[in-house]
Amino acid sequence: MTDWVFRLIDATGYVGVFLLMFLETVFPPIPSEVIMPVAGLRAAQGPLGLPGVIAAGTTGAMVGNFFWYLLARVIGMDRFHPFIDRHGRWLTMDWGDVQKAERLFGRFGGAVVGVGRVLPTVRSVVSIPAGLLHMRLRSFLIWSTVGTALWSAGLAIAGYLLGRRFERIEEIVGPLSTAIIATIVLTYGYRQLTWRRRHPR
């Protein structure tokens, strides 16, 4: 996988970094934990510049983020309401939970999106609730860009400094990703076991 990323970035430069990060956000075939360190390594070796790599990766990811936000916003809460009523048991939420989330995004949406962008797994899906709950576009773009830039820069700088020793990056990011996924799975299992409709339709 890493060799293929090297070849694509070597052949297309910043455009390749942009496309890979866009695809990783829309349909993640290759994780950003591979893409950006490879791009950072190439910046260290000279063909690319580190600021350009960070900008290309951030822009590609942001186009993908905006795609999911826009799609969720087009679907809208009116279409989502019947879905929740029918399938809330499996989502472990009812409409009252959605309304609570809407109030939370109204007050702290920027912080939720900004922090979500630097968390493995969460960063790829936080655009969906932001779009469904009609988070203000300006706030979404600002906070998403800040979080995405920090994530892209951190990985690119790690690749720049560590060279081909990608396992050092994986030693940090890998356990964090696993812990977040395990927390999500355990929380979902607990809510399935204890779920009941807490609010009337």
Image (cartoon, rainbow, N blue to C red):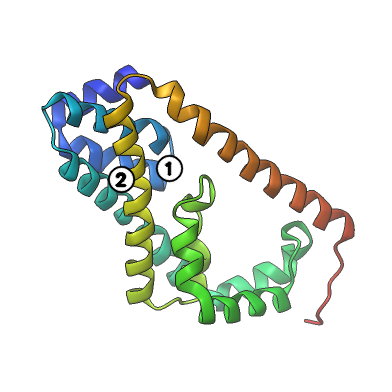
Which amino acid, by three-letter code, is at mark 1? Phe
Helix, strand or loop at label 1? It is loop
Measuring 50% from the left and 62% from the top, which residue is drawn there?
128
- Image position of 156 (left or right of 55): right
Q: Earlier in the sequence, mark 1 or mark 2?
A: 1
- Image position of 104 (left or right of 198): left
Q: Quadrant of the N terminus?
A: top left
Viewer-closest of 88 and 129: 129
Measuring 31% from the left and 17% from the top, which residue is drawn there?
3
Tell me which corner region of the image, top left, top right, bottom left or bottom right, holds residue 194.
bottom right
Measuring 38% from the left and 19% from the top, which residue is drawn there?
165
Image location (x, y in percent) of residue 55: 21, 49
Helix, strand or loop at label 2? It is helix
In 3D space, how far apart are the residues under numbered discs 1 and 2 (Cα atoms)? 21 Å
Q: Total of numbered circles in the picture?
A: 2
Image location (x, y in percent) of residue 115: 48, 60
Measuring 36% from the left and 38% from the top, which residue is drawn there?
155
- Give the number of the disc on residue 153: 2
